[in-house]
Image (cartoon, grey):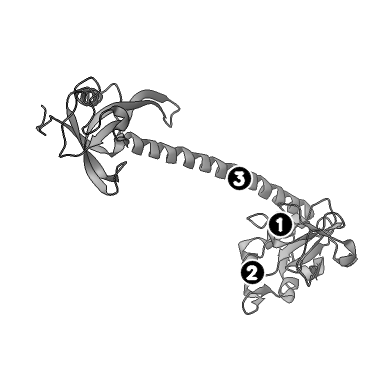
């Protein structure tokens, strides 16, 4: 059965305040509900509104439990049921609807107003220039399908169950998004990793040992600015000081995981291509440096290295 809203509920405007509402927690006793107190979906009151003195609010504008607040201005004209345990009023941004509870429940009325079809009717009746507002006459003349109170409660319970299920599904989807995003990022990082159990890893280790006697000509996947330099460079002549490794554990979607050591970065003594001479000893130092402490040391991520070629003091490739 259809009912016109004004026949099954009282409809009033919210509290009209001429000045900005300032919170007065010490002297205030009436909470003033504003748009900023609603959650992101505009369906619930999410925080405690500001307090003002009760003498500033007409008693007729104090809310009762079960009142339905409808946002009057803007693009989202959602309905919210007031269920709080404190004295409150809503600003004039809202219409306050007080249902006849013998005919219609607050939760059902709010649900009905929030339906797309009902919202379309409200939007069609808007007026204004810069900020469109619902006409009170449009709200009063809104036709509501009113089944029995039993059916209303049944529909509301089903809807609330669906909201809980939807919320849990969204949380699960967000967790899956995080999982798969992390997995993709891990795969990107792993693309240039060299696991310790591969032949390629042995080749990189060989470069490290050879660098104690020869020089590594390192080419990069992209231009980088090296320590002590102010211009991008695509390659580097250096002695490898150390090869840094780390343990990675990769988790897969089936719950399994795999751990391995991989090359992470290279610490190098870098020096000019024109000065390939190195000193004798177990830890050679690029000239003109006298010791390791004076040499410029840089750390280069393994993922940036395209290739390493070993050369001798004269720049000849070491096979």
- Picture coordinates of residue 264, whole percent (x, y): 34, 31
Q: Which residue is mark 3?
A: 167
Q: Nearer the viewer, residue 278 or 209?
A: 278
Q: Quadrant of the C terminus?
A: top left
Q: Quadrant of residue 109?
A: bottom right
Of mark 2 and mark 3, the one earlier in the sequence is 2
Tell me which numbered mark, 3 or 1, is placed earlier along the sequence.
1
**Foreground label between 2 and 3:** 2
Label 3 Cα crowd, 10 Å radius (few <14 / some 14-19 / many 20+):
few
At 66% across and 75% down in the image, what residue appears? 125
- Which quarter of the rendered picture does the N terminus lie within? bottom right
Say the numbered circle drawn on residue 74.
Answer: 2
Q: Taking 311 as reference, is 169 left or right?
A: right
Q: Is residue 62 above or below residue 215?
A: below
The mark found on residue 37 in the picture is 1
Where's residue 164, x and y in %? 64, 44
Tell me how far mark 2 sits from mark 3, CA to CA.
Answer: 26 Å
- The image quadrant that residue 226 belongs to is top left
């Amino acid at each position: 059965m259809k009912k016109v809203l004004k026949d099954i509920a009282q409809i009033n405007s919210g509290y009209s305040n001429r000045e900005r509402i300032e919170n007065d927690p010490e002297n205030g006793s009436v909470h003033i509900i504003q748009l900023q107190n609603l959650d992101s979906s505009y369906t619930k009151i999410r925080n405690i509104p500001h307090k003002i003195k009760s003498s500033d609010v007409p008693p007729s504008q104090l809310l009762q439990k079960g009142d339905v607040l409808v946002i009057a201005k803007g693009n989202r004209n959602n309905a919210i049921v007031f269920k709080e345990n404190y004295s409150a009023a809503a600003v004039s941004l809202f219409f306050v609807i007080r249902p006849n509870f013998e005919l219609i429940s607050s939760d059902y009325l709010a649900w009905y107003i929030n339906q797309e079809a009902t919202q379309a009717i409200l939007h069609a009746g808007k007026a204004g220039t810069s900020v469109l507002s619902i006409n009170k006459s449009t709200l009063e003349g809104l036709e509501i399908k009113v089944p029995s109170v039993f059916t209303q409660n049944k529909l509301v319970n089903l809807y609330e169950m669906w909201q809980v299920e939807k919320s849990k599904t969204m949380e699960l989807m967000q967790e899956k998004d995080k999982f798969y995003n992390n997995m993709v990022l891990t795969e990107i990082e792993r693309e240039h990793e060299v696991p310790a159990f591969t032949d390629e890893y042995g080749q990189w280790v060989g470069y490290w040992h050879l660098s104690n006697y020869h020089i590594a000509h390192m080419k990069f996947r992209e231009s980088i600015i090296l320590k002590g330099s102010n211009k991008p460079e695509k390659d580097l002549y250096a002695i490898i000081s150390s090869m840094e490794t780390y343990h990675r554990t990769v988790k897969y979607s089936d719950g399994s995981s795999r751990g391995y050591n991989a090359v992470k970065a290279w610490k190098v003594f870098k020096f000019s291509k024109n000065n390939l001479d190195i000193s004798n000893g177990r830890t050679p130092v690029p000239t003109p440096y006298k010791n390791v402490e004076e040499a410029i040391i840089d750390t280069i991520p393994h993922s940036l290295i395209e290739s390493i070629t070993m050369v001798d003091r004269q720049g000849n490739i070491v096979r």
